[in-house]
Each structure stands twice: as C-alpha cells, then as structure tokens.
Amino acid sequence: MKSLMDYQFIPTESFCESLKQHFRDEYQSQEKKPLIGKEDYTNKKTNEFCQTLTEAHRQILAGLEAFINRTTKDFPTDALFKHFSKIAALTPEECEAQTIKQLLEISDADYVKLYNLAAVELNNKNFTDASHMFLLLCWLNPNVYTPLLGLGLAEAQLGNRTKAQEIYEQCIPLGKEDPYVYLYLAENCHKLGDKSKCKGFLDEAKMLATKKNDKVCLELIGKINI
C-alpha cells in the first residue's frame, strides 16, 4: 500500500485549470453539483474532467468537495477556493521543498479550522466524508499525525480495518508519545483478532496514559478485553 504520507502529487496545469473552471461554473453559480463520485452527470464538461483524474487526484478532490459543502462564515468557500487556485503555479521543485499547506499559504489557524470541520463530520458519523477530509489534511501537511489518526478512525468505522491498521501504524513516528495512537491500534488489532499485537499496544497505551495521568484514556483501555 502506498503511504498516505506520500500524497504530495504534483497537479498538472490542465488539471488545475479544469478544477478552477469547475469551481467557477458550479460552485460560484450556487448550483453545487457533485464534483466526483456520481455516474449520472448531465454536465459533459464535468464528465470529461473526471475521466482525466488519477486516483490520488480523485481522493484529494473528494476531500476538497466535502470541505466546500461545509465551509462556514469562519472559513468561507471563497477563501478555500482562493488557496487552491494557487495550485496551478506550483512546480515539482517547490512541492519537494515545502508542504502543500505552506505553498498554498494556508495559515495554522485556518488549518485548525479545516481540521475541526473534519472532526465534526467524524463525530456526526459521516465517515466517508470525514475520511476524504482527513486525507486532504494529510496531503496538505504530512508533518502532523492527528489528521492521519482521524483518517484511521474514519476508515475503521467504515469497516476497512486492515487499511485503518496501516494508517494507525503510520502515526507512530510522529505520535509515539500519544497513548491514543496505541489505544486505537490495540482496539483495531482486537477487531482483527490479533490478540498478541493487541496486548502489546495496550501495554504501551497504558504506560503512556499513566505517565500523562490521562484518566479518560485509561478508562477506554480498561474496556478492551483480551
């Protein structure tokens, strides 16, 4: 499986222009037709656009659409569009040197707002959209693990336990001091029937939670019976 931390794909100029034109045609006209994922398009231009996308493009766009459909007055749609309209100017060299978040000039405060929107969808059990949104956040900034953890939670709730396990394991390098990383790994291993790994991750979670005096985490650990 390709690491989700590797989704630093370089959008082509034609892809970016098609995306921006689609925004102008669909979102700014208030029609808000689906960007991807539907088979019953009546818009031939949109059909042609979607057929040119790679799987990585599709996943990024699905996250972008999910955000656009939920942006609030604190982070309006036009602000998000303004950030992503800069994609066409990016070069491969720039993308290798900085995160996409930096290149699109998305501030830490705005990134947190986007993260909170994704977390709301996760809490509301809109797991498919939450998965797309967290993946987009991972693409924007692969140097933080919390969106990756959210992605794992969404995939686990969608029943994709093996995929969730791989995602959780990618959280360890950056989240090795977070007991919840190991808690979710243990819970997922339990669901997959791997008791040995489950116990190892539980022990690590308990040690870190005790060290941090995280009573909520310790209570959740106690609910996993192996």
Image (cartoon, rainbow, N blue to C red):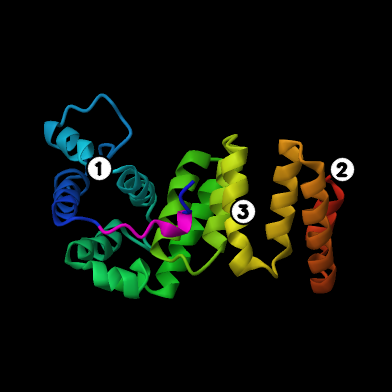
Distance in Å between CA atoms under marks 1 and 3: 27 Å
The amino acid sitting under disc 3 is Tyr
Badge 1 vs badge 3, beta-carbon distance below 8 Å? no
The residue under label 1 is which amino acid type?
Leu
Disc tally is 3
- Mark 2: secondary structure: loop
**Residue pictured at 83% horizontal, 66% vertical:** 207
The residue tagged 1 is 53
Residue at the location (25% across, 41% down)?
Answer: 32
Q: What element carries label 3?
A: helix
Residue 176 falls within the magenta-colored stretch: no
Mark 3 and mark 2: Cα distance apart in space:
20 Å
Residue 88 place in picture, x, y as percent: 18, 62
Name the side, left or right, on which 51 lies relative to 139. Answer: left
Q: Can residue 124 be seen in this view?
A: no
Q: Mark 2 points at which residue?
A: 225
Q: Residue at x 30, y 48 (%)?
A: 57
* Looking at the image, residue 13 lies above or below residue 158: below
Label located before the other in sequence (2 or 1): 1
Say the numbered circle drawn on residue 168: 3
In what quadrant of the picture does the C terminus appear?
Answer: top right
In magenta segment, residue 8: yes
